[in-house]
Image (spheres, helix red, strand yellow):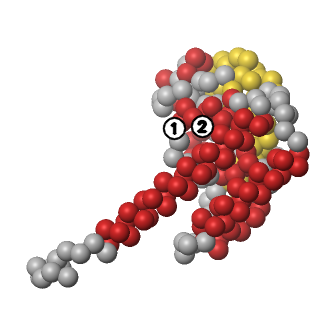
Amino acid sequence: QQDLIKKIISHDVENDEEVLFLILKEDKEKNKMMPGDFYPIGVKGIIIGKNQENSTGIKAISRIQIDKINIIDGEFQVEFSERADIEDIEEAKGQELIKEVKNELRRFVSVFPWGAVARNYIAKWNTLEEIAASMSYQLTISSEEKYKILETDKISERHERIRKAIYELIEITQIGNAAKKSTDTVPGKDVSGRSY
């Protein structure tokens, strides 16, 4: 949301401007943050455009290793380097896993009224990392588990963590929906006290 970005960044952002995501270990007010409050791995992204819904698109580009953080008068100065992936999975196998996860997500959303809109988003995702970033708010795993995905260098291991997190979300949601449906149909009494 553009309002949130304005609270964090002291100027209007422009397309193609570079941004860094520093990951806090615990929630903290900005004026109380210290360099040691952040995990050593973050994410670099770029601004890709604003839309009329008062939001700004940010595309994650790469993982970064935070080498040094200086905080001067509330402004962050960050020294960082690119963090390399360990590519230990064949491209064909990686594409097969992406296809499997996307198909599972399509089946999952098909039962919801908003499923058609969700399928359009799913069709545009090209990597498991992109799926995880887009669904991060929905994932049921802890913040620590999300960071574990981010810090994992081996692509095969990272992809497996993402796959498990997405399938866990699907399973928990389906169990919740089934439980809700069963309570809606359990015999009982109506508001007049009559049995049904």
User: Does residue 92 appear left or right of residue 17 in this picture?
Assistant: right
CB of mark 2 within 8 Å of CB of mark 1? yes
State how far apart marks 2 and 1 are (Cα): 6 Å
Q: Residues within 10 Å of mark 1 (few under 14, many from 20)?
A: few
Q: Secondary structure at mark 2?
A: helix
Q: Residue at x 66, y 44 (%)?
A: 162
The kind of residue tagged 1 is Ser
The residue pinned by badge 2 equals 146
Quarter of the rendering occupied by the C terminus:
bottom left
User: 143 or 156: which is nearer to us?
Assistant: 156
Number of on-image labels? 2
Q: Where, by quadrant of the figure, is residue 70 drawn? A: top right
Q: Where, by quadrant of the figure, is residue 42 drawn? A: top right
Residue 112 point in image, percent of width and height: 54, 72
Q: Residue at x 77, y 61 (%)?
A: 124
Q: Relative to 146, does residue 130 appear above or below in the rendering?
A: below
Q: Relative to 118, does residue 8 appear above or below in the rendering?
A: above
User: Does residue 152 appear left or right of residue 190 in this picture?
Assistant: right
The residue pinned by badge 1 equals 142
Name the disc covering residue 168, or none.
Answer: none
